[in-house]
Image: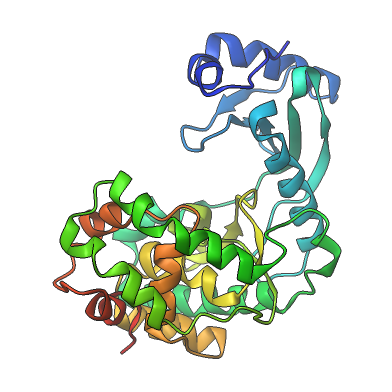
Amino acid sequence: MLPVVETEEQWDAIVRDETVMRPGAEALCAELGLAGLPLARFAEGSVPVYAVGDAHVLKLFPAASAEDGVTEERVLTRLQGALPIPTPDVRAAGAHVNGWRYVLMSRLSGEGLAPAWPRIPQADRERIAHDCGRALAALHALDPGPLADTLGPGDWGAFLDRQRAGAVARQRERGLPEAWLEQIPDFLAAAPLPRTPQRALLHTEFMREHLLVDPADGWRLTGLLDFEPAMVGDPAYDLVAVGLFTTRADRRLLGRLLAGYGRGFEPRLLMAYTLLHVYSNLPWYLRELKPSARTLDALAEEWFGVA
């Protein structure tokens, strides 16, 4: 049986402990008619995710993040067959013991784009970027209305106000130097942030780590995963993870991706959303991408400009 996980302390003590988690996952698989199939936990992910045989994936959400399980189920159901990149089909989902939720989904083929990236030829990288843009455009073209009762934030302008109010404190807590911190208020005040944008379904973490490719089929994209952080809001918000983690400040790749998407975005807008993103961690991004820029305006061009 899966134990109670309602606090950070319980999460740290239990969720990563396979001596506790595996028996609970095996019992749930038996209830779902999958007893006896090989069960292998994926190393990645903040919540427990298991390959169940060759055809299924079981994702478990403790009570502390049960709402994420509802989001994953609802969004994957909405997306079935709707994108040019495959997404998992929901096979079963629901509440389980002690506040846990689960989503049993189809297992997609391919390997992770992030670890595969160094082996991919430049021409294929550019085609992948273009195909990512097409997929993101298809996602944003879907009517998000059927998910409005599940996905936030609701009032986009109010969301921006909350994120703006805490922007400096968030980055200071993450260790951003004062030379960057002092630029944030004026930069956000001048940024072209729309309070009532055309609303779209957002992945919010569209990046190499959540994409699959098939090396035996010309590095074709075979999967887009992990929709539990999905939101409804300004399409430009989705370009933060794209610029930082998919094209990784490569102006040519971002240009190819936006050509596939069908439109461009103002770099200062994307930089503003980088600061306002719910998972924003500018010190980490600076360490990862090592930009030459020393101002937020220059950083916007370096990370989100195109060639």
Depth check, front residue: 231 or 40: 231
Depth check, front residue: 48 or 70: 70
- Considering only vertical position in the picture, is 230 above or below 129? above
Q: Is residue 239 left or right of residue 180?
A: right
Q: Residue at x 52, y 58 (%)?
A: 205
Residue 162 horizontal/vertical position (percent) = 54, 59
- Considering only vertical position in the picture, is 227 above or below 17? below
Residue 146 horizontal/vertical position (percent) = 86, 64
- Considering only vertical position in the picture, is 78 above or below 139? above
Residue 124 visible, this angle: no
Q: Is residue 306 left or right of residue 227?
A: left
Residue 29 horizontal/vertical position (percent) = 76, 22
Quadrant of the rendering where the C terminus is positioned: bottom left
Residue 138 visible, this angle: yes
Q: Is residue 143 left or right of residue 232?
A: right
Q: Residue at x 78, y 69 (%)?
A: 144
Q: Residue at x 39, y 71 (%)?
A: 243
Q: Which quadrant holds residue 285?
A: bottom left
Count of marks placed on residues: 0
- Considering only vertical position in the picture, is 149 above or below 2? below
Quadrant of the rendering where the N terminus is positioned: top right
Depth check, front residue: 272 or 157: 157
Q: Residue at x 74, y 42 (%)?
A: 105
Q: Which color scheme did the rendering employ for the protein? A: rainbow
Residue 189 horizontal/vertical position (percent) = 40, 78
